[in-house]
Amino acid sequence: HPIALERRVPCGDWPADDSGIHHPGTAGAAASQNCHARAERCSSQNASDGLQSIRRRQVALTQQVSLRANMIWNSAGSFISLICQWLITVLVVKLSNSFEAAGVLSICMAIANIFTPIAQFKVRVFQVSDIKDEYSASEYTAFRILTILVALVGSCGYAIATESPATIPAIMLYVVYKLIDSFIDVLHGIDQKNMRMDICGKSMAVRGVLSL
């Protein structure tokens, strides 16, 4: 740096002009230019290293897996999720003392099936086909939150209007459980656009087992 150079090179060693002010000579000017060149090279190298680090992180986040792995994971996750849903109905009937619990479960599933399509609003199909990214992932997520709130309010009003007060807590808990799946569905849409259906399959498998 020129200031550092001035501190290292005494002014008395530099030639003076007619006014008596000392200036760096040829050696000092060359040293100053070398300092500037080294500083510019270091700055360029640091900027290049930073860009490469950012690119490596982006590639790691969006790294695609093979089509075969996507199909295997997604199929396995869907199968495990369906098996777990079937086991839930079987266990409710087997573990309850009467068929009343199974009847309540069927009512919960029926009401959830009415309002879950409202929560999903078929946005997943449009989301994964938005190859030009006309809408961002945050916009899809925000819209899904809005439709989930509409479905939650609608299911609550429907349950209060049509069912007995004793079954309303079970209905609302099951509806909330299904609406959580609806929210995760929009996240799976983001994974699908990035060719990471393996994440979707793993998520479905884990949520299926935990639901038991």
Image: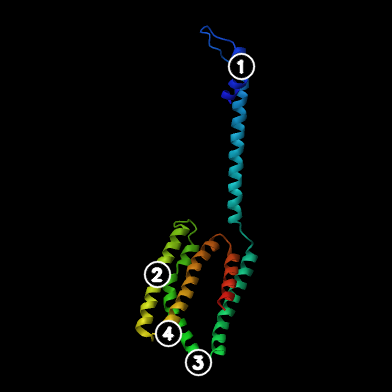
What's under tag 1, amino acid-wise?
Pro
Q: Secondary structure at mark 2?
A: helix
Q: Quadrant of residue 9?
A: top right
Q: Secondary structure at mark 3?
A: loop
Q: What distance separates the C-alpha of mark 1 from that of mark 3?
A: 99 Å
What residue would you read off at disc 3? 99
What's under tag 3, amino acid-wise?
Phe
What's under tag 2, amino acid-wise?
Leu
Mark positioned earlier in the residue sequence (1 or 2): 1
Mark positioned earlier in the residue sequence (2 or 3): 3
Q: Position of residue 99 (x, y in %)?
A: 50, 92
What residue would you read off at disc 4? 167
Mark positioned earlier in the residue sequence (1 or 3): 1
Q: What distance separates the C-alpha of mark 2 from that of mark 3?
A: 32 Å
Q: Secondary structure at mark 1?
A: loop
Colouring convention used in this rendered image of the protein: rainbow
Query: Foreground residue, 16 or 154?
Result: 16
Give the label, 1 or 3, closer to the camera: 1
Mark positioned earlier in the residue sequence (4 or 1): 1
Dot label at residue 149: 2
What residue would you read off at disc 1? 10
The relative height of residue 31 versus residue 207 in the rendered view (above or below) is above
Mark positioned earlier in the residue sequence (2 or 4): 2
Q: How many marks?
A: 4
Give the label, 4 or 1, closer to the camera: 1
Q: Position of residue 21 (x, y in %)?
A: 53, 11
